[in-house]
Image (spheres, grey):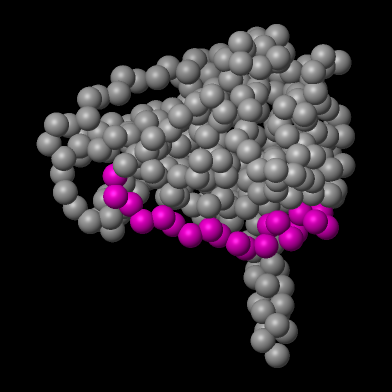
Amino acid sequence: MLRVSGNKINGLGERTPRRASPFFWHPPELHPFGDLQVAARTQSRNCPGAAEQFRAAYTYPDLIPVAAERRFGTAEVFGAEARAFALSNEADEFGIAEMNPLWVFEGYEIHEPRVIVLAFAHDYEELRQVPSDESNGAGVTEVGRQYARGTRASYALANWIRAQGYQAQPYPGPAASALLLIPPAISAGLGELGKHGSMISRHFGSGFRLAGVTTDMPLIPTTPDRFGADEFCTHCQVCTKACPPGAISNLKQVVRGAERWYVDFDKCIPYFVEAASCAICLAVCPWTRPPVRPNLLAKMARRISERSEQGEN
């Protein structure tokens, strides 16, 4: 039983927009769930192979100094080069958004005006073996593997940008820092928010992780990608029924002034800790299943097209 409600800290029911409060995965002294956080890390690292991957995720390379001589160029060229660099250095998807102050956690500051968001796709067959335990760590090891890729890729991209003479700061998971990752990822076109509280991508379904890089390099934002996942979630019950603690609601809720999908923290996290991580909702999501995703994309595209035509007539 949680002594303090994480839902209250997260702003559930609040109708006034505000910045998010530090929560799970921030330094323990910044939130009341430090003991659970330590237990979660201990449990997950007991799974075979997981400790090595998570050590890699928390092994942060050195950041090089920003070059004294700034290279000049157009936002179009810099964007194309940054994308090419990221995709050739472990990232599977790339997007750009203009910074929104609401994406910065309370108590932190970010001065760079833009954020690059990177996605790292899971191996579906590995991911679907969740939750893991001390006899089979494939699922949680796969989660650690993608977080480790995010650490390496975000630091590599930040150093590439710094070598061009621009500020850049990496923000990999799973340890939370100043930057919320899901809101800029949605703005940058990497996917839509799903009922399970994570993102759904047209390319990877729910099976991917995120990392970010903030920068003052001139870049043109990419556009949001609306392909019908949000609408699909209003009728789909798969993750709701599969969630062991019943943390996934069928209805959107108001959180810090915005109506959106929300997962009950007080139900989710205790189970997450006990099970040495979870990710069941990501693995069972129909969008995550490679054979199913193309059909869903086609179905939702037809529905969106039909609605558009009806609106025009």
The residue lying furthest to the left in this view is: 69
User: Image point 87% across, 34% down: which residue?
Assistant: 246
Percent position of residue 87, x then y: 37, 45
Say above or below: 59 vs 66. above
Residue placed most toward the observer, 72 or 51: 72
Which quarter of the picture shows residue 229? bottom right
How many numbered badges does the structure rendering display?
0
Please give the name of the residue rendered at 63% of the width and 45% of the height, measured from the top-left corner.
Answer: 199
**Residue 119 appears in the rendering:** no
Counting from the top left corner in percent of width and height, residue 305 is at 66, 77
Indicate the quadrant where residue 45 lies. Answer: top right
Residue 138, magenta (yes or no): no
- Rendering coords of residue 186 (x, y %): 56, 50
Q: Left or right: where does residue 74 sit relative to residue 277? A: left
**Magenta span of residues:** 217-236
Q: Quadrant of the N terminus?
A: top right
